[in-house]
Structures are given as structure tokens and as C-alpha cells.
Image: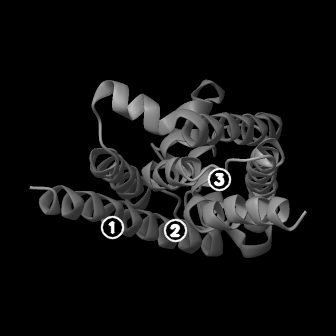
């Protein structure tokens, strides 16, 4: 039981800081500004489901897939970090302002739930790298199935957390007002740029060290 609980906490606690659903919620709200409430709620549910399957695939088979295509984790970090920083830059420049809440060209449609809302906003390259690392440390022995099940339960809990945070993003906007949410969106976008650059640099540094 202790090992099973540890496996659950390892997956959930390992992914929560890098998924950062609380920090991504304002970006999600800004990018779905043109959607109705029902469409946004559906998007939140779809993104959480997509995130679960993407995390599950990364954890169980990510290292094998990268090996088949000859792609290393540092390369994934460089490419994904650049993509994440670019998206943050776009939201930072085209996001909400207090005067014109509809003045954003970063809006997405309900058909864009996978890209860019799931990848790279919710499950970015850093998250995939962490999931692959967690998957590479899968246990062996008689408790294998129980611990794998606990890991999957951790992914389910992470997906539910994403849904709750994205689903509640509009309530946060109402509480903060247009000016407050505009500030929060731009601050989150700036942090997203920094995260993207940090992920990219970690990949570049790993590539340099491998020379």
C-alpha cells in the first residue's frame, strides 16, 4: 500500500509544477475569449482528456517512440521551448487589455483543442520530458500492476486538476475584473516565455554537454 501511494504521489507531485494548471488558466481564458461559455467548458473537458492520453503515452511509450525516430529529449526541449516561448510572446502582445477585452488575435476555435491548448500550453515539452522520465523508472516485481495503476491514477488526478482550473478560469476573471485579468494574463504570458526559454536552454545545454 505504501509503494502504491508513493507511485501515485510521485506522478502527481512530479507533474503538477511543470503542468502548472493554475498559471495556464488565464492563458486558456485569453485564447478562448471568442468561445461561448458552453464551448469553453467543452474545451476544458477535451483538453483535460487530451492531456491524460498524451501524458499516458509519454509515460508508457515516450522513450521508445523517441528512440525509433532518433530524437533525443534535449532536442524535444529545444523545439518545444521555442514553441512555448513563441506562444507566450503572442499572448503577451495580442492578449486582453482593460479597454477592449475582445482585442486578441490569439483566440482559438473549439476545433483547436489539441493544438495549441493541449500541446504546448497544457502539456509542453517540459511536461513530456518529466513524463518520459517517470515512465523510464517503472517498477518491476509482484507489485508492478498495482504501481502502474497508481501512476495512471496520478495522471487521472492531474487531468481532473487541469479541468477544474480551466473550468474555473472565467470565475477568476469575474472576481478580478477586466483590468485584473488583463494584468494576470500578461504576467502569465511573460512567465510562459521565461519557462519556454528555460526549457530551451536546458535542451541546448544538454546538447552542448553531449558533444
How many angstroms separate mark 3 from mark 1 (CA)?
Answer: 24 Å
How many angstroms separate mark 2 from mark 3 (CA)?
Answer: 11 Å
Q: Compared with residue 47, is residue 90 higher up or lower down, i.e. above or below? A: below
Q: Position of residue 177 (x, y in %)?
A: 71, 71
The residue sitting at 45% across, 39% down in the picture is 63
Neighbours of disc 2 within 10 Å: few (<14), some (14-19), many (20+): many
Q: Nearer the viewer, mark 2 or mark 3?
A: 2
Residue 198 numbered mark, or none: 1
Q: For mark 2, what is the residue?
A: 188
Q: Which quarter of the image is occupied by the N terminus?
A: bottom right
* Residue found at the far right of this picture: 1
Q: Nearer the viewer, mark 2 or mark 1?
A: 1
Q: Is residue 28 left or right of residue 189?
A: right
How many angstroms separate mark 2 from mark 1 (CA)?
Answer: 15 Å
User: Is residue 109 at least partly visible in the picture?
Assistant: yes
Residue situated in front as seen by the camera: 191 or 81: 81
User: Is residue 102 at least partly visible in the picture?
Assistant: no
Q: Is residue 135 left or right of residue 40?
A: left
Look at the numbered disc 3 and give the secondary structure of its residue.
helix
Looking at the image, tell me whether mark 2 or mark 3 is earlier in sequence order.
3
Q: For mark 3, what is the residue?
A: 29
Q: Which quarter of the image is occupied by the C terminus?
A: bottom left
Look at the numbered disc 1 and give the secondary structure of its residue.
helix
Q: Is residue 199 left or right of residue 118?
A: left
Looking at the image, tell me whether mark 3 or mark 1 is earlier in sequence order.
3
Q: Nearer the viewer, mark 3 or mark 1?
A: 1
Residue situated in front as seen by the camera: 122 or 57: 57
Q: Compared with residue 209, is residue 66 higher up or lower down, i.e. above or below? A: above
Residue situated in front as seen by the camera: 35 or 140: 140
Q: Position of residue 166 (x, y in %)?
A: 73, 53
Label 1 near label 3: C-beta < 8 Å?
no
Amino acid at each position: 500500500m505504501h509503494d502504491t501511494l508513493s507511485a501515485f504521489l510521485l506522478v502527481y507531485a512530479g507533474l503538477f509544477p511543470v503542468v502548472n494548471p493554475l498559471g495556464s488558466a488565464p492563458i486558456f481564458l485569453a485564447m478562448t475569449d471568442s468561445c461561448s461559455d458552453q464551448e469553453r467548458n467543452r474545451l476544458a473537458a477535451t483538453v483535460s482528456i487530451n492531456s491524460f492520453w498524451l501524458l499516458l503515452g509519454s509515460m508508457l511509450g515516450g522513450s521508445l517512440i523517441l528512440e525509433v525516430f532518433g530524437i533525443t529529449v534535449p532536442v524535444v526541449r529545444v523545439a518545444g521551448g521555442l514553441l512555448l516561448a513563441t506562444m507566450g510572446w503572442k499572448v503577451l502582445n495580442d492578449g486582453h487589455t482593460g479597454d477592449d477585452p475582445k482585442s486578441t488575435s490569439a483566440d482559438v476555435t473549439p476545433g483547436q483543442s489539441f493544438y495549441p491548448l493541449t500541446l504546448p500550453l497544457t502539456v509542453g515539452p517540459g511536461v513530456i520530458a518529466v513524463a518520459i522520465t517517470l515512465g523510464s523508472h517503472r517498477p518491476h516485481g509482484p507489485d508492478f500492476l498495482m504501481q502502474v495503476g497508481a501512476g495512471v491514477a496520478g495522471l487521472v488526478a492531474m487531468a481532473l486538476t487541469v479541468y477544474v482550473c480551466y473550468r474555473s478560469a472565467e470565475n477568476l476573471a469575474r472576481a478580478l475584473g477586466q483590468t485584473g485579468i488583463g494584468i494576470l494574463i500578461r504576467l502569465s504570458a511573460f512567465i510562459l516565455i521565461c519557462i519556454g526559454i528555460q526549457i530551451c536552454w536546458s535542451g541546448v545545454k544538454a546538447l552542448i554537454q553531449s558533444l
